[in-house]
Amino acid sequence: MASKKLLNLFQLRFGLRAKLLLLSSFLFVIPWFGYQYVWEMEKYLRFGQEQTLVGTARALATALHERSNLFNNQASFLPNVEQGKDLYGYQLTEAIQLDGLHSDWPNFSQRAYFYDRQQQLFASEPLTLNFKSSVGKYDKYLYLFFQVVDNNVSFRGKNSRSITNNDHLALSFSDQNNHLNRFIISNKQAGWISAFSITDNPDDSPKPAPHVQGHWLLTSQGYNVELRVPLNNLGDNIAFAFYDVDQPDGEIVSAIGSAEPSKLDSLGTILVPSPEIERIVKGMRYTNSSIWVVDQHHRVLASAGSLKSASGVWSNKEKQLTENEKSSLWYLFKQQILLPLYYKVLTKPPADFIDKLYDARHLKGEHIVSALAGNAKSQWRLTTDKQALVLSAAYPIYINNKVQGAVIVEETTNGIRTLRNRALEKLFTVILAIMLLGALTFIIFATRISSRIRRLSNQAEQAIDKQGRIIGKMSASNTNDEIGDLSRSFTTAVNQLSEYNHYLENMSSRLSHELRTPIAVVKTSLENLALQEQQHLVSNEASDQNAYINRAQTGINTLNLILTNMSEATRLEQMLATTEKIKFDLQKVVCSCIAGYQQVYSDYTFNLATKLSKIEYQGSAEHIVQLLDKVINNAVEFSQDKAISVELKQQSNHVELLISNNGVLLPEQLSESLFDSMVSLRSACSIKNKQQDQPHLGLGLYIARLICQFHQGKISAENHHSPDGVTIKIVLPTKV
Amino acid sequence: MTKRIAIVEDEAAIRENYADVLRSQGYQVQTYANRETATQAFNLRLPNLVILDIGLNEEYDGGFVLCQQLRAKSASLPIIFLTARDNDFDTVSGLRIGADDYLTKDISLPHLTARISALFRRQEAFKQPVSDEHITQTGPLSLDSQRMTITWHSKSIDLTITEFWLVHALAKHPGHVKNRTQLMTDSKIYVDDSTITSHIKRIRKKFIKTDDNFDCIETVYGMGYRWLSDMDSTISHG
């Protein structure tokens, strides 16, 4: 039961407007479709970017093919490289101040290589020495930095001729002509270094080498040495070693270094970014890409561009807005409301991201491995902080049909993402506008339609009352559409029904009118006959033949009465139309009427219950009396105990008159239609009714209803029980 | 001299029935079935009394038209409408255009002849000097039962025969309540209750036309009406 009610409620709520809104929700497919389209577009753009990137890599690789001289002095020919021995000179971006401090070395702690027991050259005592070193290249110099940990720092004696009986650094490199150049840095005190050039011959006295410059700084753990060597005479091979002396003017106790510096063969290699390749690569830096050239040991030979500015060919600079545009209302609205909303869904490509995948010296990655194996490859990867998507393409460089290196070109997808975002912003704005407009239109349309239909249904409900009577007229709509048609056909139907109803209600009157003339003919003829008969009687003193005439006259009189009663309702309607309402005392009228009825129906007892002394009422007293006549007459006829009670009550805005009699109950289905024209109960319960001389057409209560309607009142009949009976309730509004 | 009565009625049976009864009463009766023949005859010579039906054949208002024409010819010619139409509107219209009485066809023939003779009597009475024996005086009201005229504060009130009989029945016994049946018997009509109500209303209006303060006919709701003479109007209220 309750669930059914709920269902009903639900069905009620789900009106036309809701249905239209539900249907219009299919509009949401459009933004989804647009979104999908933009994603698809991005996919193609990415594909395009990938192709472009591979093209860039290929172009650069083409420029580098078969130029062996570029790679010769880059130690690229080595079959393998040994960490610590084969050195890599980082490309420094700023000049280094030779002060023994590593603060101006970028990323020193990561780039420095730690030398200890592994790189021990010899030791006569347990090792008390280790150091970190870093190599860098700036302008025309190769910079070296050493951070040495030593338990006992011993400088060269003030008057000592020997440069090796103290803590010293041996540095050797090959020159352009592949001759070994050997230097010893041996200081008498901290400060500017004293470098000496030595030869293989121990008899040759060391010569000062002023082109090797640097600084010796004492630290709490040992000492730092920072020095530079001009690049112009620097070959591919290099080695350095620290010699530890613990006693002043003592013997060397141990040595650690990158390689044995005394022989050309034992030197390690040094790789510095090649200025020639860099020059070629620089030409490509306008492609908005980050470019690397690596040798076959994954070591960077040259690089150009930065990943942060490498957002691809699709990144075009945002159009600068004028002040006017910036202060426009639309711009402000877009910036402050729309964009924050959009970026709840979209992600802005980060301008600042961190990518630590590539050590500046050593590049790793599947694509590089693949390229060095001879296959060009591109791949997508995330930056190490997972903020940006990077597209990398690697292309092999061939020298003598052998892969000697690879070109790696990288770009972020930020350009595409920005482009996509801008497209989506526009799409969202347009869709938002369309949907707002569409929804508004839909709502207005649906509201209009549903309100029209509701108005129509209200009109229809108001035109026909519960008993199916037409109580008002409908006004037809002029709109030329389906609802207008509906309204018009409704109106026609209601009007026709109303006319038909009126026809039915007037039928008795029409009938009586039509019957009146023939009855008058019969009546006058009978009367003439009677007169003649009387004259005969006077002259002949004869028989009782006139008995038939008397019977016929009685019958015709009854017939006449019926006709008069039949047209009574119509006459009343006509009279009511011209009746004016005047003020009178309803209480007095009812009281005197009841007194009158007491006289007329002397067998019956009338009980009038009223607490009021005076009721001012605006209406027609005669008709109220007529109404009472009809209702009381009805009550008297149906009363079984010959007692009728009348109750008059005044409510806030209406007067209630209750007339009850005890007797037969009303059948349920008739209680509503009892007040209709020509509806009578008497046939059903006329067994006890002796007054058959009075014709009953069922017009009495219909007349009562007409009078009630004239006073904007209501009349209804209800059964009451113990004792059984019927109460007629008349409600007359006092305030209209 | 025999009175000549003209009956204009489209229904032959009724027409002849009326004619017969009137002839038996000693009147000379001429019957007409439509307006044209009636008009032609009336142009030649006017009868002493005319009984008219309103609807004549196709003419819905033929009787009214005829009544107007007759009234234009003679102001004193008694005209009675005898019709099947019993609505208030037709009654009012008929009386307004100058008919002396408006009767419905359910009136019995004796009632009709009584009315006709009353009309003739009234006509005769006008030719004779006013005799006091027929005059009843009740307060400001004086009734001349011979001439069937009523004056109120010495001003004449123009009433139809039916109305005169009603007032007469009420004023004969001031203070007594007359119920509708009694009134109908006295005024020789048989109609339903609401017709009595509208008759009383019309009478009141006619009195009020000459005297705004007229309230001598009291409705006793549920019973009937009574005439209040000035003196007992105050008493009977209490």
Image (cartoon, coloured by chain):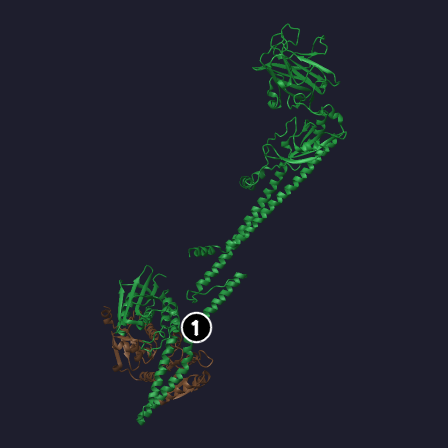
The mark total stands at 1
Q: Is residue A325 left or right of residue A605?
A: right
Q: Amino acid at mark 1?
A: Leu
Give how far across and how far down residue A240 sits, in percent. 67, 17
Asked if one can make out residue A359 in the rendered structure from this viewpoint, the answer is yes
Q: Is residue B100 visible?
A: no
Which chain does green denote in the image?
Answer: A
Residue A46 falls in image quadrant: top right
Element on which disc 1 rests: helix
Q: Position of residue A164 (x, y in %)?
A: 66, 10
Q: Nearer the viewer, residue B34 or B221?
A: B221
| Rendered view: A696 above or below A616 | below
Which residue is nearer to you in this view: A517 or B39? A517
The residue positioned farthest toward the top in the image shown: A159
Tell me the quadrant of the picture where the N terminus of chain A can be found: bottom left
Quadrant where the image shows the C terminus of chain A: bottom left
Q: Quadrant of residue A364?
A: top right
Horizontal side of A114 relative to A376 (left or right) equals: left
Whole-percent x and y of residue A349? 59, 36
Pointer 1: what residue? A504
Chain in brown in the render = B
Q: Relative to residue A336, is residue A60 drawn left or right? A: right
Give the chain of mark 1: A
Nearest to the observer: residue B69 or residue A607: A607
The image position of residue A286, as x and y in percent, is 68, 32
**Circle 1 Cα neighbour tier, 10 Å, few/some/many (<14 / 14–19 / ≥20):** some
Q: Is residue A548 above or below residue A193?
A: below
Q: Depth check: give the residue in front, B26 or A423.
A: A423
